[in-house]
Amino acid sequence: MSVEVYAVPLEVPVVPLRIRLAAHLRIARLDHSIKQVFILPGIVLAMALAGERPSLVLAAKMLLGLVSATLIASSNYVINEILDAPFDRLHPTKKNRPAACGLVHFGWGYAQWIGMMLAGIALASTISRGFLLSALALWVMGCVYNIAPVRSKDLPYIDVLSESVNNPLRFCLGWYMVTAALLPPLSLLLSYWMLGAYFMALKRFSEYRQIDDCAVAGSYRKSFLHYTQESLLNSVVFYAATSMLFFGAFIMRYRMELILSFPLIAWLMAIYFGLSFRHESAVQNPEKLYREPRLMMVLGLCVAVIVALLFIDIPWISSVFPKSQP
């Protein structure tokens, strides 16, 4: 049985203004602002490597930067909701999204998309050139991910890689809040990218596993026509291994103390992997991960240890793990 997908989302003819405005606020997905936590490692590492100290000026730049990043991300969410509305109607839970229900005025939605981007870019221009370019790249990747003819979210594996590239871009946002004099380490950016791909591939796996019908899954998301549970899990292993490879390269070059954080990072990744097998898993909706106390406990411990290792020297590390001589 074929499923018809409308090229233009349908709207409910008459929607009360209050409900319409609430729907437009919801499609900005401000509750997803938790994802801006991926900016924080860029801030902390830049402070550690550049020797920057906390100050009121830096605090103001961080506040403006977080608002800018949230506006850019929300702009991307708005266009995602609008263009995905006909596909979301085929999903067991996403069919209840405001745009899929016809509560969103699509003319207003396109204006909201551009308006939030312009506001975010305006704020970004007051911080630094590197921050501005990173913010622009974040918005452009949202367009690449959602808008035809590219619409990378429909391409197997490219969907994961193009979405997860937002991780290193967010890292750069944090980095360029602190310093414009240094470039962020390439090895860490690659590690951050692959870590994001690991999380995103597990999200895809959890979604695919829950729908459990290739035809229905493919109607909702075209890339699912080319996936299997096995292929998704194979990609998860690849992303995890690649991420840790580049993280190890960063550690060897910049901060050997961070090698002590490996067990905690592995533990965190293992817990996340296990969550992806649950029905209605929070992995499918990362903004709900705070409801997983075990994950949050290990994440908090992991963050605390990494921050401490960035600023505390451990002399015996160099003797246990000596650098090879040429």
Image (cartoon, rainbow, N blue to C red):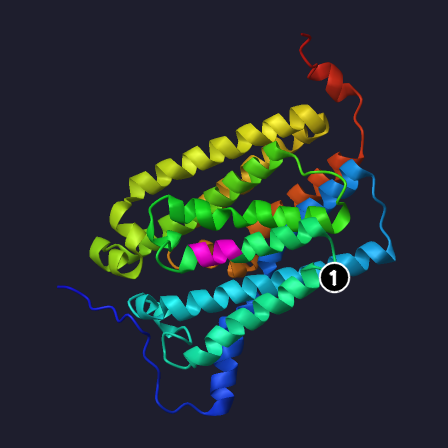
Q: Quadrant of the N terminus?
A: bottom left
The image position of residue 201, as x and y in percent, is 41, 46
**Most extreme residue toward the top, as rendered?**
326
The image position of residue 256, as x and y in percent, is 70, 25
**Most extreme residue toward the left, as rendered?**
1
**Which residue sits at x=53%, y=60%?**
287
Magenta: predominant secondary structure element?
helix
Q: Magenta span has 143?
A: yes
Specify start and end residues of the magenta stretch as a single range. 140-144
Would you identify the image quadrant in which residue 123 lies?
bottom right
Q: Magenta span has 223?
A: no
The image position of residue 214, as x and y in percent, is 23, 53
**Which residue sits at x=60%, y=26%?**
249
Q: Nearer the viewer, residue 296 or 102?
A: 102
Kind of residue sitting beneath label 1:
Leu
**Which residue sits at x=39%, y=45%?**
158
